[in-house]
Image (cartoon, rainbow, N blue to C red):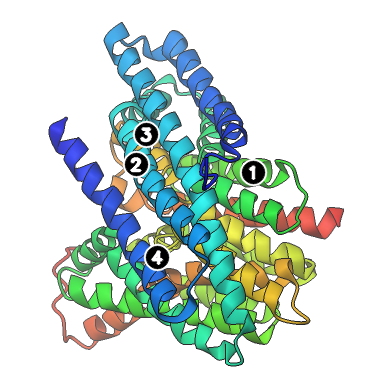
Amino acid sequence: MMLGIFEGLDNVTLDIILPIALLLIFFLVFQFLFLKRPLRQVLVLLRGLLFAFVGLVLFLQGINIAFVPMGQEIGSAFGGFDNTWTLIPLGFVLGFFITLAEPQVRVLSQTVEEASSGYIRSKTILILLCLAVATFTALAMARTVFGIPLHFVIIPGYLIAVILLFFADKDFVAMAFDSGSIATGPLIVAFMVSLTVGVSDALDGRNMIVDGFGLIGIITLAPIISIQLLSLIYAVKTARGEVSDDSGK
Amino acid sequence: MYQIIKNTAIEALGAMLPIVAIIVTLHFTVLNVESTVFLRFLAGSTMSVFGVFFFLLGARTGILPMGRDIGAELPQHNSIPLIVAVGLIFGFAVTTAEPGVMTLNNIATNAGVDNGATLIIVISAGVAVLFTTGLIRIIFGFPIKYVLAITYGIAIILAFFTPPEFLSIAFDGGGVAAGSFTVPMLLALGMGFTSVLGNRSYLSDGFGLIGLACAGPIIGLLVLGVFFF
């Protein structure tokens, strides 16, 4: 192949056979011991596994030839610029639009609106989440560009998340922690982590592993902290009587 | 069936297009990446769209219903060892097939972290243990707040003692563990599980499973960093 788009396909296939086989064995054991579903349903499951297998091979091969090299290319190009700080606004823009496009984020916004008995509008939550992820992505970029140790970001960040736990409402807490990874799908991981790894590789005195990784961990904090904060604001307003709490609890 | 195919296709395109659009814009405005790299990018993006489509379609039509059935079957045997065994094996198996986890492992290997499959195994084992903890929490009704505070508290304490190169990958590991495959799968099992428990509601008891499961890989990788390196 001229472009080498099938390069490494054999390795990718081998990597995926094992997990799919593991799932298959697990389901079959469960089927024979407990479920005992009709053959037709088992065939549907097998077809699903086959689709998932083909899908995973195509997806990971695509990631390997497209997003990883492109991320590294863009990363090292930015790392070679005189103004490496331009990565920070780039991170903000990327974070914002990726979150806006993520269907899961809309589902979450709707759920938060319902949990607040309609007081917090889903549009508000959507924008807030986009801004939060954008800010944390920019922060993660700033960390890579300036070589700030991850300890200084991760420890205070998760400490805030845990302290908020004690003040926020139970339903909001579960929702906040469950949606931590909402903005970090595999595609974002492939592109953004490759990008920061590329930047750290291009900058002098940066370590690819120490400075390149950590972005996903930082972005995960965005929904966790912002949804818990929302719950606090909502609680304060409820206490002041600005909202009628008709949830019946 | 047609409806599922259509929705999945829309979702696959919707998930890919924004980031592809941003990269293409960057290519033409600022960067001008070498043309073979760019053509490979276009070919690979197309491949990935089809990949996401088939993957989600297979997960939704075949694998998810099976997960829900298994979840509903679990509490009916009144056996904690069975729940623990199934929670552990299911959590592990599902996470090894999560594309985000494989991707992180690939990038780490490319960047020179020579780990074989250690990263995948530790992340999957971490999810397995804390997912099972989450199921047991639902049975006994421990408040989710305290369980989360304890697990993430442990992660914060371990973080102080972890060398920097492990800290970054550990927290990334927590983020990738909850992905497009693991989240619906773990929730399907959790939903089936709570649906037959009678007095428990999914909204208040089922939530928190994913957040808790994410702490598993973080703690697992941090422990690896503190004690073995």
Number of residue marks: 4
Tell whether label 4 touches label 3 (CB within 8 Å): no
Mark 2 vs mark 4: tell me if same chain.
no
Q: What's the residue at 30%, 19% (across, down)? A: A44
Q: CA distance from mark 3 to mark 4?
A: 22 Å
* Amino acid carrying mark 1 in the image: Ile
Q: What's the residue at 64%, 66% (across, down)? A: A213
* Amino acid carrying mark 4 in the image: Ala
Mark nearer the viewer, 1 or 4 = 1
Q: Is residue A152 visible?
A: yes
Where is B128 relative to A36, above or below?
Answer: below
Tell whether label 3 touches label 1 (CB within 8 Å): no
Instruction: Pick whichever of labels 1 and 3 is earlier in the sequence.
Output: 1
Quarter where residue B108 is shown: bottom right
Mark nearer the viewer, 3 or 2 = 2
* Amino acid carrying mark 2 in the image: Phe
Quarter where residue B169 is shown: bottom right
Circle 1 is placed at which residue position?
Answer: B120
Residue A176's disc is 4
> x and y percent of residue A209 in the render?
72, 66
> x and y percent of residue B184 in the render?
37, 43
Q: Secondary structure at mark 3?
A: helix
Instruction: Pick whichever of labels 3 and 2 is earlier in the sequence.
Output: 2
Q: Is residue A228 left or right of residue A249?
A: right
Circle 3 is placed at which residue position?
Answer: B193
Residue B50's disc is 2
Query: Dot 1 falls on which chain?
Result: B
Q: Secondary structure at mark 2?
A: helix
Mark 1 vs mark 3: tell me if same chain.
yes
Q: What's the residue at 44%, 69% (across, down)? A: A224
Please tell me how crowded label 3 is: few (under 14), some (14-19), or many (20+) other residues with Cα within 10 Å. Answer: many
Mark 2 vs mark 1: tell me if same chain.
yes
